Image: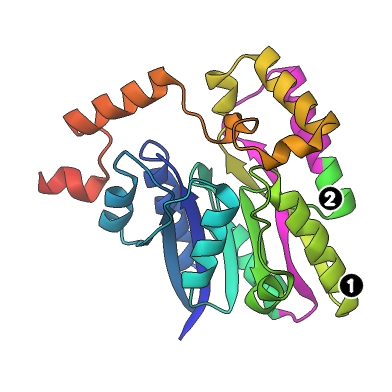
Amino acid sequence: MTEYSIIIPAFNEEAYLPEALESIFTATEGNPGMAEVIVVDNNSTDRTAEIARIMGARVVPEPVNQIARARNTGARAALGRYLIFVDADTKVTTRLLTEALENMKSGRIVGGGVVVAADRPLDPAAQSVFNAWNRFSQLFNIAAGCFVYCERVAFEAIGGFSQRVYASEELWFSIHMNLWAWRNGKRFRVIRDQPVVTSIRKLDWFSPARLMLSSLLLTFFPLALFSRRLCHLWYQRPDFICTANSNKSLNGSDAPPAEREAS
């Protein structure tokens, strides 16, 4: 019987998915209990689904391009008692997975998130933003979207991730989880001593001015969260990224090890 399910929503993630999956499979090997890894192919036009299958993940399609919908589709397909949502550009360690599972198995913690670390050194301004987020996350028990864990029963009780919004669904999810946990004598806990490493690729893709403008828009006009167009930073890939990924696919340099050896 499957004990826990790791769910990865993925839209055109052929460049990052192999490393994420490799870290996840390694982490599952270091933890007891039957596990499954699900990649939700969120209408990708690249080799995301193919790579996921080659590496041993179960692929579940979700044709509507929305992060919350992809997470919920993966949860509906999952067989595990515990659900762990991981972004396709995020690396999971054995110790982090162990702590998340132990928290839920304790019966006192319904789920939570984890503090976040960048995948490369940041300049002081960007690092201060990361630090501020981590302080906010720990103070209010708000999970970052790159790693969210929870019991299935709690996930179903609150209705999963809100599909009304196109971004920040993890914030609303955390708020509802905190309330459900409080009503049921449990906690929603952010893991502090096992930071998860995630990509800061948006800093390469978009200018600081554009990132700041989008952040201010969503902060002062939260109704923008209901518009996919206004949340474009979560769904748009710059043209030069798409071209580079296509070229890698054509020459095979981005294929997972198993495929390169067979070719």
Which of labels 1 and 2 is toward the front?
1
Whether residue 32 is visible here, answered yes or no, is: no
Whether residue 247 is visible here, answered yes or no, is: yes
Residue 254 appears left or right of 79: left
Q: Is residue 2 magenta?
A: no
Q: Point out the image quarter for the N terminus.
A: bottom left
Amino acid marked by disc 1 = Trp
Residue on which the image places disc 1: 182
**Callout 2 secondary element:** helix
Residue 7 in picture, x, y percent from top left: 50, 60
Residue shown at 33%/53% (left/top)?
52
Amino acid marked by disc 2 = Gln
Residue 106, compared with residue 91, is above or below; it is below
**Residue 24 versus residue 30: which sits nearer the camera?**
24
Residue 176 in picture, x, y percent from top left: 80, 63
What's the mark number on residue 138? 2
Residue 175 in picture, x, y percent from top left: 82, 58
Residue 182, compared with residue 86, is above or below; it is below
